[in-house]
Amino acid sequence: MSVEAAQLHLDADSAIHNTLARIRAGVGRRLKLGLCFKFTRYGLCRDLAVPLEKPSAKIPITVPPLEDRDLAPLFSFDMTQCGPDEKGEVATQRKFVDQGARGGFVAIDQRSDTPCYVQWLFGVRDNKFI
């Protein structure tokens, strides 16, 4: 019985090389989260022909587009008191921003002028990024 090995030489710009690099990076990111990780995502849908009734917030907020100055208060804090779900969510959001996510809107608590929540809005142009 014999075994032969073939070495595949790829250009750094080839489609296969880029695909393999993307897969390798994705597997690495997933393994950093641990062997077992669960999260849930929700998508919302509404009838655009029906007028939207805006609920009032329990605290006074404004919702401007996300800016770089909003990132530190949202994602840079001591997480020692956070549970695994919160740590996973923050890690996912941080990675998302690091990879170049755009289209975020941030809720600013008007009482303290501090960002307290971020929500992403994506369009067709963002499909490749997602």
Image (spheres, helix red, strand yellow):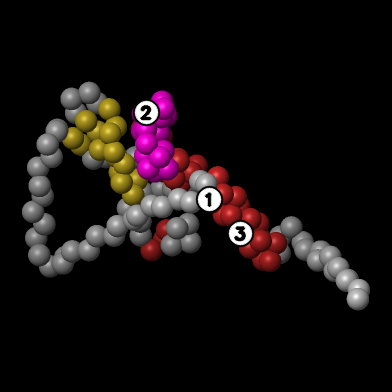
Verify CB contact (< 8 Å) between mark 2 and mark 3. Answer: no
**Residue 69 seen in render:** no
Give the vertical position of 12 relative to 64 (above or below).
Answer: below
The residue positioned farthest toward the front in the image shown? 1
Q: CA distance from mark 2 to mark 3?
A: 33 Å
Which stretch is magenta?
73-89
> Which residue is more in the foreground, 92 or 55?
92
Q: Amino acid at mark 1?
A: Leu
The residue positioned farthest toward the bottom in the image shown? 1
Q: CA distance from mark 2 to mark 1?
A: 22 Å
Residue, disc 3? 23
Q: Earlier in the sequence, mark 1 or mark 3?
A: 3
> Which residue is more in the foreground, 47 or 90?
90
Rate crowding at label 3 as few (under 14), some (14 to 19) or many (20 or more) other CA atoms within 10 Å.
few
Q: Which mark is residue 81?
A: 2
Q: Quadrant of residue 105?
A: top left
- In percent of width and height, residue 5 lies at 86, 68
Image depth: mark 1 or mark 3 in front:
1
Q: Amino acid at mark 3?
A: Ile
